[in-house]
Image: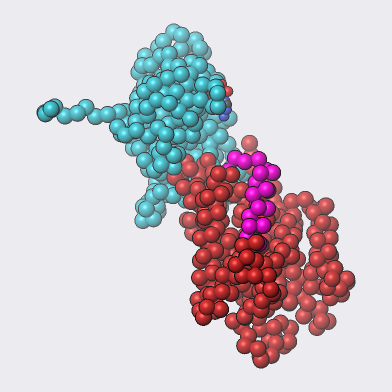
Amino acid sequence: MSGVLHQVLSGLATGSIYASLALALVMIYKTTHHVNFAQGEMATFSTFIAWSLIEAGFSYWVAFLLAVAVSFVIGLAIQALLMRRLANAHVLSAVGVFIGLLLIFNSISGWIFGYTVKAFPSPFESGNEKPVLGGYLSAHELGASLVTLAVLLAVYAFFRFTTLGLAMRAVAFNPQSSRLVGIRVDRMLALGWGLAAALGAIAGIMIAPIVFLDPNMMAGILLYAFAGALLGGIDNAAGAVAGGFAVGVIEALGGAYVVGTELKLTIALLSIVAVLIFKPNGVFGRHVVSRV
Amino acid sequence: MLTSAAEPMPPLLEARGLKAAYGPSTVLHGIDFAIDEGEVCCLLGANGAGKTTTLRAICGMVRTEGEIRFCGERIDGRATEDIVRRRIAHVPDGRGTFMELTVEENLRLGAYLRPTAEIPAALAEVYEYFPKLRQRLRQQAGTLSGGEQQMLAIARALLLKPRLLLLDEPSFGLAPIVVEEVFALLERIKQDQRLSIFLVEQNANLALALSDRAYLLETGRVVMEGTASELAKNEAIRRAYLGF
Ligand SMILES: Nc1ncnc2c1ncn2[C@@H]1O[C@H](COP(=O)(O)OP(=O)(O)OP(=O)(O)O)[C@@H](O)[C@H]1O
Ligand SMILES: [Mg+2]
């Protein structure tokens, strides 16, 4: 029984990472109607930035904040330089660009920082403390979950309670009407990309101590996040976050009790395919109610 | 050269030789119109005449040629959000409300350009005109009745504190009694605020009753203009648009 609890808690801990990456995917999806396949590689690149800042002698949290800020700017730049031109492009052109971005970020990471696997420090562990919560979680798992949860709550509050957040949601629903109330649509789209990139950066930095840092670090993680987003509903932020946590738990339980670690990705994906067969919009995907 | 006489006030909105096109097909073939400060002006015409396109042209939502001036300054070729920032509010056909958002969120978006300090008073003012909206603040806009949605769309536009209000068929899809309600409200708003309005309407009777002046559009050309009462008396208009 305590074994199950252990798996659930550690599933929730990794799930929090999937959840924030899933949220980043949803934020881009809602405005562009495309899945940003490059989200994972962008996060890896951000993690490398944090790593080199730490190597250069910056304290952990300064490096963390700087890397998140730089990622935010990279997100803005991608929207302004690339996506703006792509607004009316064919779906396949867009997919091509996203895959191109994936490859570019992947090879830039490898070219600048090398392909050798690197250890990434955790701010929550100095190496000799005991597992917390009665041994159910490592200190890093707990710390990373708390950071991610705090970030998710902050993002929620931003979209729910601020005028800027409301304007960004309005743009996602209806760009034309947004212009008619005076919202600068392009700026909101850029801001969305910036926020998504920053979210990805936080996810990357938080998971790096667990999975180690190399240019392909996020490939598998993005798959889990994508699965989570689909599970919850790719156009539903709250659903995608819940989906991310669910995938984390399914992965942990499935890996421990059903198929072993080699096949846990498979079981996570299978369970999602099963859900989508019955609920194509995701568990929480909603149909917009409207009267004509 | 010295001129002692004051320049005559330019009209609030003035279009000269306005053309508009969707891709290769030209829809407006060079039209002229002007709206003065405090004036209610309506644009009549059959389906497909180009009325919606005219309003879209003013807001920079369609490719145009020719001049559009607002308070004497060129606004043609500018981005929609910049034109809106000069406080031209547009209630488009289809209303342009955010269906997925709540009534309250729609209203907050309407006041997007207003300084935070002004918003409570501005909201109180629109609740005065639209008391029903106040009872439905938490309701998703898409679930409002057609009439309520039109009220929300107008309320949203008023929250901009517009200098010019563009209304595209506020009666569209509404039961006659609701149409009367909407027009009674517009009349009240006109009286209270001396608001300048450019109104597109199929219901020529109601539109002419509310308006000071009117233009008649036929396949992208202005074929008649005059005071609302002149047009209401005109035989051709009565037969074609007023039905008596
Ligand atoms: N997005 C568009 N693309 C191509 N043609 C369009 C587009 N919108 C309108 N048109 C054409 O432009 C012409 C004028 O349309 P517009 O919507 O301005 O007419 P309207 O006077 O508002 O008509 P209604 O009374 O039916 O609303 C029509 O022939 C229409 O087919
Ligand atoms: Mg029309």
Residue B3 part of the magenta segment: no
B153 relative position to B214: left or right: right
Q: Colour of chain A?
A: red
What percent of the width, then of the height, locates residue B70? 34, 33
**Quarter-of-image position of residue B2:** top left
Magenta residues, start to end:
A87-106
Residue A89 part of the magenta segment: yes
Residue B18 visible here: yes
In this view, the residue farthest toward the top is: B235
What percent of the width, then of the height, locates residue B67? 37, 27
A170 relative position to A265: left or right: left
Of A92 and A183, which appears nearest the observer?
A: A92
In terms of image quarters, where does ligand 1 lie? top right
Residue B184 visible here: no
The chain drawn in cyan is B
What percent of the width, then of the height, locates residue A109? 62, 65
Which quadrant would the N terminus of chain A be assigned to in this image? bottom right
Residue at (45%, 34%) from the top-left corner?
A: B60
What percent of the width, then of the height, locates residue A283? 75, 57
Residue at (64%, 78%) from the top-left corner?
A: A120
Residue at (55%, 78%) from the top-left corner?
A: A54
Which quadrant would the C terminus of chain A be assigned to in this image? top right
The image shows residue A175, relative to residue A104, as above or below, that is above
The image shows residue B237, relative to residue B2, as above or below, that is above
Residue at (30%, 28%) from the top-left corner?
A: B11
